[in-house]
Amino acid sequence: MKPVIVIPFHDPDGILLPFLAKIERELKAIFEQAILSISPQTAQRQVDALRRLSADSFYQLIHNDPNTLPGEHYINGWRYAVAHFPADCSFHLCDLDRFAFALDSYRATFLDDLAWASAQTQPVLFQRSAAAWATHPSNYRELEGMINRVGELLFGTRFDFAWSHAVLRGHHLRDLLDHLTGRDFVILIEMVLLLREQLLLRAVDWLAWEDPYILGVSAETLRHQRENSQTETEKRIRGLLPFFNALHATVEPLSPERTWSRPTFGQA
């Protein structure tokens, strides 16, 4: 069977819905079904649009309870996926905005990468290439870069912990779900940490910064605005601080037996 795409869908202002309509033909050609895990704000404000989607059997809409957080929206979509499709089904876990951008801006390479990932039996994590990172605002790069560098020092491999596109078989996703503890975006790093020894990593240019495309504005103008916005920087910090806790949980804590002491010459 064809793979299935699972998308957390937060679009209370209706910015993404036109892009969903734009790529619908390609989605239906590539995937068996699209599972959209709808945020409460979106369900409240986009009633007519969601009603139209729910009338199409290609879409399965998962409605999340009030006061739930993004991580719960991800997980509820994933739980539906593993409960309704075979264990060997390939699931693309991704964001709609990045998917629409990649399809429009990097079409041939993007489609080739999707087909390759769908054929893999190991979990796949698409990561931002150096070229893709260079398109992002500096505050995005610096904050995420700190987290990714700590992971590299710990594990010897650089992971893109705040990932936007992963591909897993159903049995891998099912095994993960009972071990994810977060309610917010920390589940992204939790997934990588749990799978890190199995992941196939592929750095791609199509994970370039998508916001200028989605918002229809100049990349330079928007980048300058984001880089000079304390509100934006604080938002990024707020979302990423729990990632350090997840990394900390992988390290043995200080104890009477493992203290912070000055090593003697020649000690590692």
Image (tube, rainbow, N blue to C red):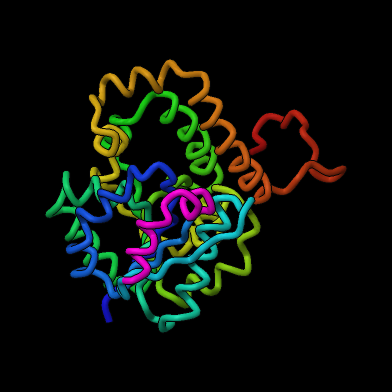
Q: Name the main secondary structure of what is drawn in magenta.
A: helix
Name the foreground residue: 69 vs 206: 69
Q: Quadrant of residue 121?
A: bottom left
**Residue, x 49% and y 58% (percent of image)?**
196
Is residue 204 positioned above or below 58 on the image? Answer: above
Q: Is residue 262 left or right of residue 25?
A: right
Q: Residue furthest front?
A: 48
Up the image or down, 118 lies above or below 107; here it is below
Residue 155: say if magenta: no
Judge whether residue 244 can be spotted in this image. yes
Residue farthest toward the right in the current orientation of the protein: 256
- 204 sits left or right of 54 in the view: left
Is residue 158 visible in the rendered structure shown here?
Answer: no
Residue at image coords 39%, 50%: 164
Residue that lies at the very extreme toward the left in this rendered image: 108
Question: What's drawn in magenta, residue-wise?
Answer: 39-55
Q: Is residue 46 magenta?
A: yes
Quadrant that contains the N terminus: bottom left
Residue 34, given in percent of the width and then of the height, sits at: 34, 67
Position of residue 264 measured from the top left corner of the image (x, y, whole percent): 72, 30
- Report the residue at 54% width, 47% height from top: 185
